[in-house]
Amino acid sequence: MAFGRLETHKPHAPMSEINVTPMVDVMLVLLVIFILTAPLMTSAIRLDLPQAEGGEAGASPQALSLVVDAQGTVYLNDKPITAEALRLRLAEAAKRNPNAELELRADESVPYGRIVETMGLAQKAGLSRIGFVAQTPSTPKR
């Protein structure tokens, strides 16, 4: 140390390494976002609901058959029926046997709202066991 001179410090050298910690934090946040949103993306899959793989439906002795054709006409046990008569017949069937099953068959072209309306009639009448009948596809659709 020389007399009258102040000691000078060398300036710090620039850091030449990449700080990886922020990059890892961002990647982990993105991973969590993808893990949480992946199950929600399954609703984008196109479905053909009227066809289903499965066994043949067995005939239940206490089952009612409700059919809605392509024109929207409702049939109860293969006989055409009006909405008011259907409401009365379903209520009568529910009083006789509250565990009776309703087999609902609907044409593929029937609007979903019409099916929901028919199901609502059955539930208001007291029938809670509603089964959807679909045909097994003969050839796979692409």
Image (cartoon, rainbow, N blue to C red):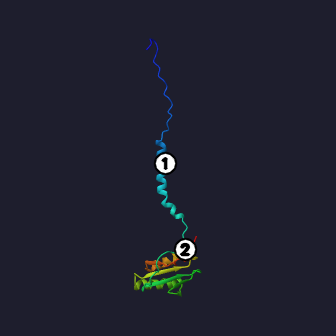
Q: Amino acid at mark 2?
A: Gly
**Residue 68 percent location from the top left of the image:** 54, 81
Residue receiving disc 2: 113
Q: Which residue is nearer to you in this view: 14 or 96?
A: 14
Rendered image: mark on residue 14: none
Residue carrying label 1: 27
Estimate the spatial distance between the alpha carbons at disc 2 and disc 1, rounded to whole Å. 44 Å
Q: Are marks 2 and 1 in contact (CB under 8 Å)?
A: no
Q: Is residue 141 left or right of residue 91?
A: right
Q: Position of residue 109 (x, y in %)?
A: 58, 76
Seen as rendered, the residue at the extreme front is 139
Lateral position of residue 93 relative to residue 48, left or right? left
Callout 2: SS? helix
Mark 1 is surrounded, within 10 Å at the Cα level, by few (under 14), some (14 to 19) or many (20 or more) other residues, namely few
Residue 65 percent coordinates (x, y): 48, 84
Amino acid carrying label 1: it is Met
